[in-house]
Image (cartoon, rainbow, N blue to C red):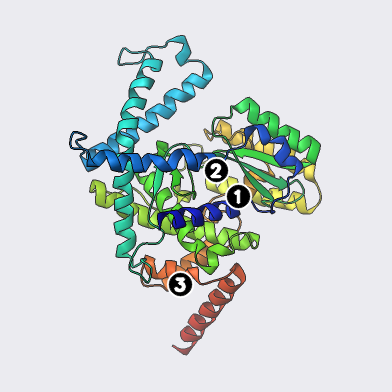
């Protein structure tokens, strides 16, 4: 049974990242030295949990675990590991800068990685249990009474993503998985080569998670965000067995519908699970509610204005003007504290896939909120949405709902 789930989800992953069939494009050739292998990762990762399960059966293998405390401890350590590794890349830790604890960062890194490794299997199991229980409460079990597919997660750095867009229009033309440890200079070199030789916009970007099986989730964003990502990736796996997920790559809007719905529900459910674990909640309002700084700069508004202006320039055929404008805006964002390495068509093609982000101009976020208001609970939303084969069907349903509500208001 487990093998069947794994194979099905692997096929899903191949569909998600391998659009365009089995053709070997010039872009793929250029990025070949950096490519990430799903097969190699599966072979290396899958035995780990079985080894952990066997160890648990051994009487002398006993790790004391406090669910709430160790969960928070693990994510604090994981965030710190990420910070120290970033210093290593910059060469700072290699020069032996001493931290407040009196140890060089390199020594602290070894100590923290050791702690992370010891905690990781139990943390993964705990998160899987919390998320599974929440999904089951929403009635998302299969007709056989089991959660399908079972929640399975690997807490580690996901692969990076190479996003390709045409230069004259913002569209996610291709996505390729790359190794997560590619340094900035290598990313820049690859992106520039693709632009100069293929006349395409390219961006190598880090992602928070990916729906392999187990799902790969970066633990460096904290407990709440990790829960959100786990739910997000599970929804993709769940919908893969339904019309919505099977048609993920049918057209741009159907892709946006998949991603935006997963984002919306994962944020809602992830907040609930987080509150149940730690006994408190954080602000779960839209990401667009960023606090305005003293200068009056509002990032979501500025980013959306940038996207709209770029769209106009591209429609006029002014590609170079659009690219010059995006670079000017990128520098403005950096000056305001938003560390955007590259702002180009590929950036908007990727972030625009998520209708709730400032880089998107899609109406799908509002349509999903309208649809959510008509459902009883999260489970009802997830099951109903799963039956739409594409965005056109969903849009038709939204229009019908809106017309019905307007007719009722007139009748009243």
Q: Quadrant of the C terminus?
A: bottom left
Q: CA distance from mark 3 to mark 2?
A: 31 Å
Query: Mark 2 or mark 3, which is nearer the start of the sequence?
Result: 2
Label 1 or label 2, whichever lies nearer to me, is 2
In the picture, measured across the screen, residue 192 lies left or right of residue 348, that is right
Q: Percent x, y for residue 136?
A: 31, 63
User: Regarding mark 2 in the picture, which secondary structure is present there?
Assistant: helix
* Contact between labelled residues 2 and 1, with CB atoms less than 8 Å apart: yes
Q: CA distance from mark 1 to mark 3?
A: 26 Å
* Residue bearing the label numbered 3: 384
* Contact between labelled residues 3 and 1, with CB atoms less than 8 Å apart: no
Q: CA distance from mark 1 to mark 2?
A: 10 Å
* Residue bearing the label numbered 2: 38
* Residue bearing the label numbered 1: 17
Of residue 387 and residue 4, the one placed in the foreground of this image is 4
Label 1 or label 3, whichever lies nearer to me, is 1
- Residue sitting at x 40%, y 62%: 148
Question: In terms of image quadrants, where is residue 144?
Answer: bottom left
Q: Percent x, y for residue 151?
A: 38, 53
Q: Percent x, y for residue 58?
A: 22, 38
Query: Mark 3 or mark 1, which is nearer the start of the sequence?
Result: 1
- Residue sitting at x 58%, y 51%: 14
Of residue 287 and residue 220, the one placed in the foreground of this image is 220
Question: Is residue 306 visible in this depiction of the protein?
Answer: no
- Residue sitting at x 37%, y 72%: 143
- Residue sitting at x 53%, y 35%: 338
In the picture, measured across the screen, residue 38 lies left or right of residue 147, that is right
Question: Is residue 383 visible in this depiction of the protein?
Answer: yes
Query: Mark 2 or mark 1, which is nearer the start of the sequence?
Result: 1
């Amino acid at each position: 049974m487990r093998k069947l789930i794994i194979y099905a989800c692997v096929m899903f992953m191949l569909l998600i990242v391998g659009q365009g069939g089995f053709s070997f494009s010039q872009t793929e050739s250029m990025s070949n030295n950096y490519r990430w292998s799903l097969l190699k990762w599966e072979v290396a990762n899958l035995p780990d949990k079985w080894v952990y399960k066997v160890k648990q059966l051994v009487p002398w293998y006993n790790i004391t675990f406090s669910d709430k405390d160790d969960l928070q401890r693990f994510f604090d350590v994981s965030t710190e590991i990420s910070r120290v590794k970033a210093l290593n890349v910059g060469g700072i830790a290699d020069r032996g800068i001493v931290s407040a604890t009196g140890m060089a960062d390199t020594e602290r890194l070894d100590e923290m990685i050791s702690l992370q490794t010891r905690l990781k299997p139990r943390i993964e199991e705990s998160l899987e249990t919390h998320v599974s229980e929440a999904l089951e409460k929403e009635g998302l079990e299969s007709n056989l009474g089991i959660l399908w597919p079972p929640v399975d997660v690997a807490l580690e750095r996901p692969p990076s993503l190479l996003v390709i867009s045409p230069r004259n229009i913002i569209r996610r033309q291709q996505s390729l998985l790359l190794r997560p440890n590619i340094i900035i200079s290598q990313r820049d070199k690859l992106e520039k080569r693709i632009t100069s030789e293929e006349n395409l916009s390219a961006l190598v970007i880090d992602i928070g998670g990916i729906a392999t099986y187990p799902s790969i989730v970066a633990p460096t964003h904290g407990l709440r965000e990790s829960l959100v990502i786990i739910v997000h990736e599970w929804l993709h796996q769940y919908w893969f067995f339904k019309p919505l997920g099977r048609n993920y790559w049918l057209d741009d809007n159907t892709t946006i519908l998949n991603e935006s719905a997963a984002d919306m529900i994962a944020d809602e459910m992830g907040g609930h699970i987080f509150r149940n674990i730690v006994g408190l909640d954080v602000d779960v309002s839209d990401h667009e509610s960023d606090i305005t700084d003293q200068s009056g700069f509002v990032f979501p508004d500025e980013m959306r204005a940038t996207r709209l202006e770029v769209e106009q320039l591209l429609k006029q055929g002014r590609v170079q003007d659009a690219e010059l404008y995006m670079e000017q805006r990128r520098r403005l964002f950096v000056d305001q504290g938003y560390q955007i390495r590259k702002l180009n068509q590929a950036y908007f093609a990727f972030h625009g896939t998520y209708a709730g982000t400032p880089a998107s101009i899609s109406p799908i976020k509002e349509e999903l909120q309208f649809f959510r208001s008509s459902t009883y609970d999260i489970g009802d939303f997830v099951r109903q949405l799963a039956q739409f084969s594409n965005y056109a069907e969903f849009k038709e349903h939204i229009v019908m709902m809106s017309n019905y509500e307007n007719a009722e208001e007139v009748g009243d």
